Image (cartoon, grey):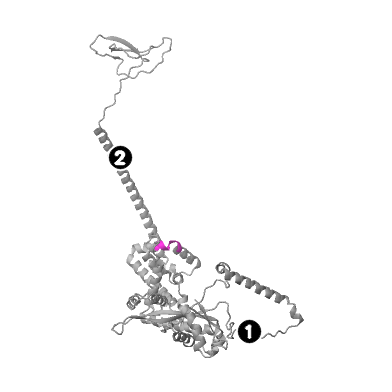
């Protein structure tokens, strides 16, 4: 049985409603619940009654969006943000209370375990915790000792950090005392390395010294000192600057500290004083650098320089008696400084002479004899039938000589070819031994004679027999030396030439 309801409606004209086909079956739709089956509507107009069944759709009231202003939207956003912040704060407080409760429970559990362990230690016969730890660290049981070693290897750093956090003063005092002992031992090793042996030649000290070698030896002998100084110089996380080598500063600092500990650790300072001498450093600068530990004092530097000169002179004397050599000299302007200048005593330059001894490469000692050159031969030819036909060796020797003459003619016509073609001797490092400067003016014949006498007799200490054993001595220099030396050898030295005028004193001149 169908239920019916009716309501009073005002006739309204519906717009845009499509007409339904009467042949189309009706689509039943549920009717929303009503307060009563019959709802009278007072329209104050002529009323009509319309009967609605449960399947007739009821027109819905149109929903209209509320118009919000910009201020309303801003207030709504603020309220929502405030509400979200309050909810987040509430969640954090809840999580914090949960964490604190969990932490409290864990601490309570750990305290219970710790008390049980300490009670067990006391029950085992150890009255104090110190006695137990001492026995544990000093145990001789192999298994327990291995466990303690693994504990210290894996967790030793964390244990030290915990001790420092618990008692920072005690941990810092222990660290300083331990570091002090370690640094003292390493400083002794470093000073011993930089201390030359007694009576060590200065030449050997200069030859052995190396900044790279010093740093390598310091890293090996004093690693703690190097790490501390590097940490002081280079902050953690910073890169090495390109314009400055901090390793040089480290080497200088190590050498200065070694000299401050041991006055005999002067290997670095000996090398530096020779460098400063070569640069013309003043005595005042020497004093300042000596107090800084970088170099020796001026007096010590002069003594080292004199020892080096004596060592080199001894070596040159040995070379002059065992190896073929040549001499090169030239004039030198020597500056003389006068502290209290007067009319007849002022700063001035005097003419002097400097010479160098150069060992000959590929020439044996005494290979160039002092015998005079043979200018002619008597026309006496003693030969037989076998001499008419040369042997194979003689033919090869003649051929080699002819080839040499052909090359010599070619090189004479084209001198530039000598530089482009292979040299007569291989490329090598020429040894040079500077001789002491002479306060002699070599611009005259007497000066040239004095220079030769000073070099051979005064400096090298060569006598007549030594010159004969050595053989011909080649002398090189400028044009003035090239002109004066033959005249001195020929005219001023007795018995210096034979009847033909050929020098026999043992000198051969050449342009430098």
Q: Is residue 140 visible?
A: yes
Task: Give the image quarter of residue 283.
Answer: bottom left
Q: Which mark is residue 266?
A: none
Residue 94 in the image, given as x and y percentages of width and height: 32, 45
Task: Give the image quarter of residue 305.
Answer: bottom left
Task: Please say whether residue 122 is one of the residues in the magenta stretch.
Answer: no
Q: Residues within 10 Å of mark 1 (few under 14, many from 20)?
A: few
Left or right: where 93 falls relative to 203: left
Foreground residue among 211 and 264: 211
Residue 318 in the image, given as x and y percentages of width and height: 52, 84
**Could you tell me what secondary structure mostly forms the magenta stretch?**
helix
Residue bearing mark 2: 84
Where are the magenta residues, as a range? Answer: 153-159
Q: Residues within 10 Å of mark 2 (few under 14, many from 20)?
A: few
SS state under label 1: loop
Residue 485 in the image, given as x and y percentages of width and height: 49, 83
Instruction: Give the residue drawn at x 38%, y 56%.
Output: 110
Q: Looking at the image, is 462 positioned above or below residue 131? A: below
Left or right: where 390 falls relative to 122: right
Foreground residue among 185 and 511: 511
Residue bearing mark 1: 376
Q: Earlier in the sequence, mark 2 or mark 1?
A: 2
Task: Give the image quarter of residue 502.
Answer: bottom right
Q: Nearer the viewer, mark 2 or mark 1?
A: 1
Instruction: Give the residue drawn at x 37%, y 65%.
Output: 233
């Amino acid at each position: 049985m169908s239920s019916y309801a009716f309501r009073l409606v005002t006739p309204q004209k519906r717009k845009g409603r499509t007409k339904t086909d009467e042949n189309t079956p009706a689509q039943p739709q549920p009717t929303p619940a009503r307060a009563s089956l019959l709802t009278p509507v007072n329209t104050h107009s002529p009323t009509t009654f319309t009967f609605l069944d449960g399947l007739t759709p009821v027109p819905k009231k149109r929903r209209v969006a509320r118009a919000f202003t910009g201020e309303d939207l801003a207030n709504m956003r603020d309220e929502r943000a405030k509400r979200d912040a309050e909810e987040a704060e509430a969640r954090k407080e809840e999580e914090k209370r949960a964490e604190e409760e969990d932490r409290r429970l864990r601490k309570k559990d750990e305290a219970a375990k710790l008390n049980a362990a300490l009670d067990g230690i006391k029950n085992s016969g150890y009255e104090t915790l110190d006695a137990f730890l001492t026995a544990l660290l000093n145990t001789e049981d192999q298994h327990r000792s291995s466990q303690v070693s693994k504990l210290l290897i894996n967790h030793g750093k964390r244990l030290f950090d915990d001790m420092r956090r618990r008692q920072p003063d005690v941990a810092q005092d222990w660290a300083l005392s331990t570091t002090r002992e370690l640094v003292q031992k390493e400083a002794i090793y470093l000073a011993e390395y930089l201390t030359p042996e007694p009576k060590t030649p200065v030449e050997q000290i200069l030859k052995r010294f190396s900044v790279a070698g010093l740093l390598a030896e310091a890293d090996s002998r004093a690693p703690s000192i190097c790490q501390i100084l590097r940490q002081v110089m280079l902050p953690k996380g910073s890169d090495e600057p390109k314009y400055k080598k901090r390793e040089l500063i480290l080497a200088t600092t190590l050498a200065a500290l070694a000299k401050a500990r041991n006055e005999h650790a002067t290997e670095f300072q000996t090398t530096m004083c020779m460098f400063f001498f070569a640069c013309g450093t003043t005595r005042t600068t020497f004093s300042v650098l000596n107090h800084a530990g970088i170099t020796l004092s001026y007096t010590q530097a002069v003594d080292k320089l004199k020892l080096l000169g004596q060592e080199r002179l001894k070596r040159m004397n040995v070379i002059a008696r065992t190896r073929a050599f040549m001499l090169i000299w030239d004039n030198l302007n020597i500056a003389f400084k006068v502290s209290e200048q007067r009319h007849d005593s002022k700063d001035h330059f005097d003419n002097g002479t400097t010479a160098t001894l150069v060992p000959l490469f590929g020439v044996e000692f005494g290979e160039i004899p002092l015998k005079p050159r043979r200018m002619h031969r008597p026309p006496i030819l003693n030969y037989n039938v076998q001499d008419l036909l040369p042997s194979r060796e003689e033919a090869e020797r003649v051929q080699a000589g002819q080839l040499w003459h052909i090359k010599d003619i070619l090189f004479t016509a084209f001198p530039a070819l000598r530089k482009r073609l292979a040299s007569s001797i291989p490329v090598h490092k020429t040894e040079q031994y500077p001789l002491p400067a002479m306060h002699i003016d070599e611009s005259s014949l007497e000066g040239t004679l004095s220079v030769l006498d000073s070099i051979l007799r005064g400096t090298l200490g060569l006598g007549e027999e030594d010159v004969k054993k050595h053989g011909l001595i080649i002398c090189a220099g400028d044009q003035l030396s090239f002109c004066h030396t033959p005249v001195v050898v020929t005219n001023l030295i007795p018995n210096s030439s034979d009847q033909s005028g050929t020098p026999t004193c043992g000198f051969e001149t050449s342009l430098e």
